[in-house]
């Protein structure tokens, strides 16, 4: 039986403000994390199951394929979460973007 697809990872993004970490530093750290997970995905692809390693035990290969696919899906969920956090922080294309975010007050009705 295939493993269930992982649920999306909820994102709680930081609020960029004068007393906190700069937007640029937050984005640089997230970029490093994204690249590391991307590298892990590339490495994982290199260890995809090969039928010749599983044929002596019938039924084992599909289980190995499900396991491998599940691992990739979990890493993809991490990448999606990082992308969502970058979007929430407000990436504008500049690594040096250290503008500060001030939450807007709701408009008076």
Image (cartoon, rainbow, N blue to C red):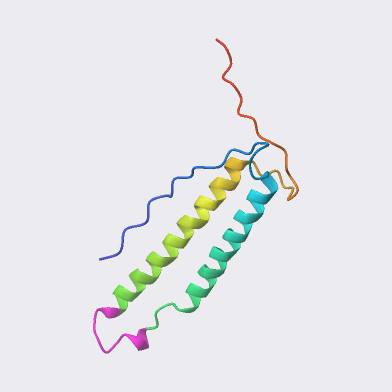
Q: Position of residue 5 (x, y in %)?
A: 36, 57
Residue placed most toward the observer, 46 or 94 = 94
Query: For the C terminus, which image quadrant?
Result: top right
Relative to residue 13, is residue 21 drawn left or right?
right
Toward the viewer: 63 or 83? Answer: 83
Query: Residue at (48%, 56%) from the top-left corner?
Result: 78
Let me know if residue 53 is in the magenta part.
yes
The residue at 74%/48% (across/down) is 94
**Residue 67: percent from the left, percent from the top?**
35, 70
* Direction top: furthest residue: 109
Q: Which of the 4 image quarters holds residue 71?
A: bottom left
Was residue 43 drawn as part of the magenta stretch in this picture? Answer: no
Q: Residue at x 31, y 79 (%)?
A: 61
Answer with left or right where residue 88 lies relative to residue 25.
left
Task: Specify start and end residues of the magenta stretch as a single range.
Answer: 51-60
In the image, residue 89 lies at what x, y percent? 61, 42
- The image shows residue 29 at horizontal and vertical percentages of 62, 55
Against 96, residue 51 (above or below) is below
105, above or below 12, in the image: above
């Amino acid at each position: 039986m295939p493993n269930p697809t992982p649920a999306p990872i909820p994102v709680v993004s930081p609020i960029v403000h004068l007393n906190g970490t700069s937007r640029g530093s937050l984005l640089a750290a997230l970029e490093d994390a994204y690249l590391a997970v991307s590298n892990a995905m590339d490495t994982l692809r290199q260890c995809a199951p090969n039928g010749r390693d599983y044929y002596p035990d019938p039924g084992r290969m599909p289980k190995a394929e499900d396991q491998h696919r599940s691992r990739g899906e979990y890493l993809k969920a991490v990448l999606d979460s990082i992308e969502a956090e970058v979007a929430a922080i407000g990436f504008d294309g500049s690594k040096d973007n250290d503008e500060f975010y001030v939450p807007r007050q709701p408009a008076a009705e």
